[in-house]
């Protein structure tokens, strides 16, 4: 809903499109932000569950997994 309605100083991004990662770096940053907000431990990575559409390819699944791992999960 925010796309096209934000002021010029704010950019609305869509890191996911149709359930798959469209922008790997933004997806990773978003996941890192969420993980840091809910898990303050630094030594032990949190366990996460990420749902993906059943029709995505193995490459797309791997991108989701890699993004979560690089984000600290």
Image (cartoon, rainbow, N blue to C red):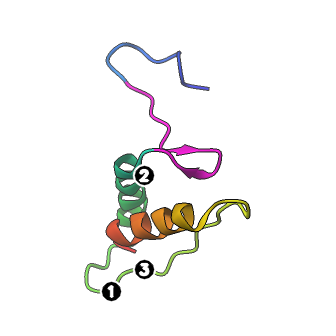
Disc 3 crowd, CA 10 A, few/some/many (<14, 14-19, 20+):
some
Residue lying at the far right in this picture: please name it.
54
Residue denoted by label 1: 44
Q: Is residue 68 magenta?
A: no
Viewer-closest of 60 and 29 = 60
- Choose mark 2 or mark 3, whichever is in front: 2
Q: Is residue 37 above or below residue 18?
A: below
Which x, y percent locates residue 44?
33, 86
Q: Say the numbered circle drawn on residue 27.
A: 2
Q: At 62% across and 26% down in the image, what residue appears?
A: 1
Q: Main secondary structure of the magenta part?
A: loop
Range covered by the magenta-colored residues: 11-22
Q: Are marks 1 and 3 in contact (CB under 8 Å)?
A: yes
- Residues at badges 2 and 3 in contact (C-beta under 8 Å)? no
Q: Earlier in the sequence, mark 2 or mark 3?
A: 2
Distance, label 1 to label 3, CA atoms, is: 6 Å
* Element type where label 2 sits in the image: helix
The numbered dot on residue 46 is 3
Sooner in the amino-acid sequence: mark 1 or mark 2: 2
Residue 50 to residue 42: above or below: above
| Left or right side of 54 for 66 | left
């Amino acid at each position: 809903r925010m796309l096209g309605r934000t002021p010029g100083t704010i950019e609305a991004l869509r890191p996911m499109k149709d359930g798959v990662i469209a922008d790997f770096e933004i997806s990773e940053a978003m996941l890192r932000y969420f993980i840091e907000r809910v898990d303050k431990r630094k030594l032990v990575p949190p366990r996460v569950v990420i749902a993906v559409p059943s029709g995505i390819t193995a490459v797309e699944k791997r991108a989701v997994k890699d993004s979560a791992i690089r984000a600290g999960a």
